[in-house]
Image (cartoon, rainbow, N blue to C red):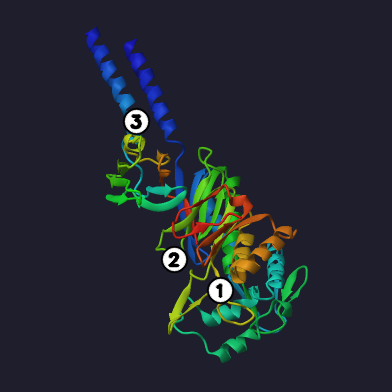
Amino acid sequence: MNRNVRIWDLVLIIALVALCTVPLWFPSSEGAYATVSVDGAIVTRLPLSEDTSFRLEDGTLLVVRDGTIWVEESQCPDGLCHEMGRISREGQTILCLPNRISIVISGEVDAYVG
Amino acid sequence: MKRRLVLALSLVFCLLYLCSCATFAQSLQVWAYDTLCTAKVWGGTNPSSVFSEAAAEGQNLISPKGDKQFYAQKAGDSLPLTEDLARILRQAEVLCEKTEGVFDLTVAPLSDLWDVNSATEPPSSEAVGEVLSRVGWDKLIRTDSALIFPERGMGIDIGSVGKGYGADKTVLALKAAGAEAGVLSFGGNVALFGSVNGEPFRVGIRDPKGSAGETFGELRLTDTSVVTSGGYERFFDYEGTRYHHLLDAKTGYPRQSDLLSVTVACADGAQADLASTALWLMGEEKGLALYEALCENPLFRPFDVIFLCEDGRVLVSDGLKDAFTLTSQNYRWEKP
């Protein structure tokens, strides 16, 4: 009996911890997009809501799928950008220093003018 | 004992969970100024009714009936001036002088003649010439308490200034009701106050050449108003020529400008609207000179500008350098 209670306590605690991470499971809202820049100049902005792939001039291949973006192929020597994996939430970035490529996720703006 | 522990832990987790979600914003909207006015407001007592009431009240800048225009029904008719209206008109007067009459609030009868929103062809040159004779700030007599129109059919239009003014008033009312932060958009005139989780708000500036929702830049700001003017907003095409709504009060025809748009950020929403229109009308070179002159003028509050030039250059004044991000590859940010 005593042992039972402890197991269920544990289950409950784990369930609650898991619940706390719910917001982290889902990729960003539909309005999120990835801004891809080379050497500080914006090359393209890819909405994360559309599955697509994009090849940069230097051959780097970016893939957008299921609200996430990642570097599929890279020409850089260290391959770190490939290892950075998939990003999907606002503020996350992938950097490829040798090729001076940056991918930044930004969300919907609060308001529009113009 | 165990159960109590579980209960306590559950409570802690629930609290942590709720805290992580921060305060929720209320989305509000009301129809005023012949446009949809929307807001997202954080905190405050009864923000919904405060918002609707204040937004409606701001419409009474020139009359208690919420008129956007004033027309003289006979020679000598006068418009009584409130303190707010007098301040706005003093600024408009400066802009009229400095633009040599290209920007002029008395353009109202001309705007009505062109009626860009519903017209399909331009008015005849005779009609433009006739109406032009009833345009001109210098014809008016301004006393401390009234603006006197010497001729029947003369008038002023404060439609767009009114939106900036009304948004400012609404921000004050929301703050007084205890709201911590808010984003207001009165038909494209944006007013921001406070912040959520210490982050500034993000305002996207539309790309005049892009499709709806496309931006050329983004601003991270708060406690200011942001207004953009450009000839791309309202127009009609006739026989291959585009006629937009920003008229040259000197010629009576839509003004040609080498600027795609001018964005102004200023704590005073009415000033932001006046300035963005006047600067756009002047074009890049004269516009920059005008901006510098206005920065020195005690009647104007400090403000910042973003010029989007026809050839793709983006000019950003010093105060917005850190707040601005370019978001389109079709333009380039020229840093002097």
Q: Does label 2 lie on the same chain as label 1?
A: yes
Mark 1 to mark 2 CA distance (whole Å): 18 Å
**Around disc 3, counting alpha carbons within 10 Å, would you say few (fewer than 14), some (14 to 19), or many (20 or more)?**
few
Q: Is residue B38 visible?
A: no
Q: Are marks 3 and 1 on the same chain?
A: no
Give the vertical position of A36 relative to B228 (above or below).
Answer: above
Residue ID at (37%, 40%): A89
On the image, numbered disc 3 is attached to which residue?
A21
Point out the frontmost of discs 1 and 2. 2
Residue at the outermost top position:
A2
Query: Residue at position x 65%, y 84% from top?
Result: B134
Q: Secondary structure at mark 3?
A: loop
Residue A100: where, in percent of width, then height? 43, 43
Element class at badge 1: loop
Q: Position of residue B112 (x, y in %)?
A: 55, 79
Alpha carbon distance from label 3 to label 1? 52 Å
Residue B60 position within the rendered picture, expressed as x and y whole percent measured from the top left: 61, 64
Residues flagged by tags 3 and 2 on a common chain: no
Residue B24 visible in the current orientation: yes
> What amino acid type is highlighted by mark number 1?
Leu
Nearer the camera: disc 3 or disc 2 = 2
Q: Is residue A113 above or below residue A2?
A: below
Q: Which residue is mark 2?
A: B209
